[in-house]
Amino acid sequence: MANLKEIKNRITSIASTMQITSAMKMVSAAKLKRAQDAITQMRPYAEKLQEILSNLSATLDISDNAFADQRDDKRIYIVAVTSNRGLCGGFNNNIIKRVNRLLTEHSGKDVKVIAVGKKGNDAFKRSVFNFRPEAIGEAHDMFNDLSFERSSQLAQFLMDEFKANKVDKVVVVYNKFKNAAVQEVISEQYLPVLPTDQEEETSGAGDYIFEPSKEEIVTDLIPKSLKVQLFKAFLDSHASEHGARMTAMHKATDNASELKRALTLEYNKARQAAITNEILEIVGGAEALKNG
């Protein structure tokens, strides 16, 4: 059994850790509220715009819509969306595992990873041979100042690369926010734009009257919609990060509290044993003096 001083030092250390994890939980809870409001307000608009985009793509010839050109996916970009900071459970590891699985599935093809978020940047820089950090400069700093303008820069780069036939397919891997405790890893095809299912095409494609012309819509609405979709993925990931960190810090605080209780019990037992030994020594000494 450890001595009293060692146990007391451990209790003090755990109490200090509890204060830190509890504070981080409260900070993440406050940030989560803002991030959750942002994605909740954005999601209906983005989903409806995506529906219109898919229906529009179904009515256009491939020659009219450069972003719906289905090709052999020999050259692929994987946009991996992680966080800048850790201490958020399996949030980042789940993305890294999914990207590594995609790399395995597409082995033999020209696959490049674009990391958004410092954790993914650090991980793939070490492990992925064809990691491409130079693609958009400081993409891993996206979440230091997340905005639609910064997100649009990456979206525009991806669209330019696709139009220039430098890439055949773009996949975005991110955590979709469901609630504070649940995040779902999503692998979403970003380019080329996927048309709606045949049944949906039949029922929905004729519901739109195009004003102005389809050509003008292609040059304006489709790029805007693609920028919105990417920004939605970033907002989803941002909210998921704070939810994951809040949950992780809550569990860490509970575990520290449990460990502190166990160590306090151990400390009391050790202290009681030490006092009992001292009493026995005193009684034994007194008996020895009496008999002597």
Image (cartoon, rainbow, N blue to C red):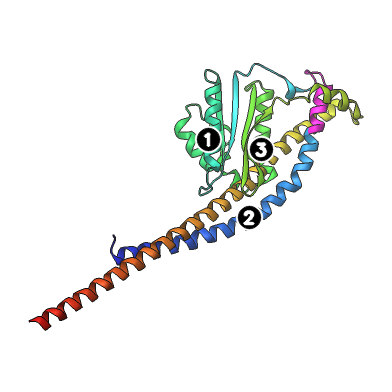
Q: Residues within 10 Å of mark 1 (few under 14, many from 20)?
A: many
Label 3 packing within 10 angstroms: few (<14), some (14-19), many (20+): some
Quarter the C terminus occupies:
bottom left
Which residue is rendered at x = 57% and y = 51% of the image? 247
Query: Start and end of the magenta stretch?
Result: 51-64
First in sequence: mark 3 vs mark 1: 1
Which callout, 3 or 2, points at the residue further toward the start of the chain? 2
Q: Which mark is residue 31?
A: 2
Numbered disc in front, either 3 or 1: 1
| Residue 220 in sight from this viewpoint | no
Front position in the image: 46 or 139: 46
- For this orientation, the residue located farthest to the bottom is 290
Q: Would residue 5 appear left or right of 240 to someone viewing this image? A: left
Three-letter code, disc 2: Lys
Cα distance between the residues tagged 3 and 2? 25 Å
Q: Main secondary structure of the magenta part?
A: helix
Q: Find out whether the residues at labels 3 and 2 contact each other: C-beta distance under 8 Å.
A: no
For the point 53% across and 25% down, the residue is 103
Above or below — where is 250 with respect to 65?
below
- Identify the residue under disc 3: 153
**Up/down of 276 relative to 217, above or below:** below
Q: Identify residue for label 1.
A: 96
Amino acid type at circle 1 is: Ile
Q: Quick check: 241 above or below 269? A: above
Q: Position of residue 277 (x, y in %)?
A: 24, 71
Q: Is residue 192 left or right of residue 94?
A: right
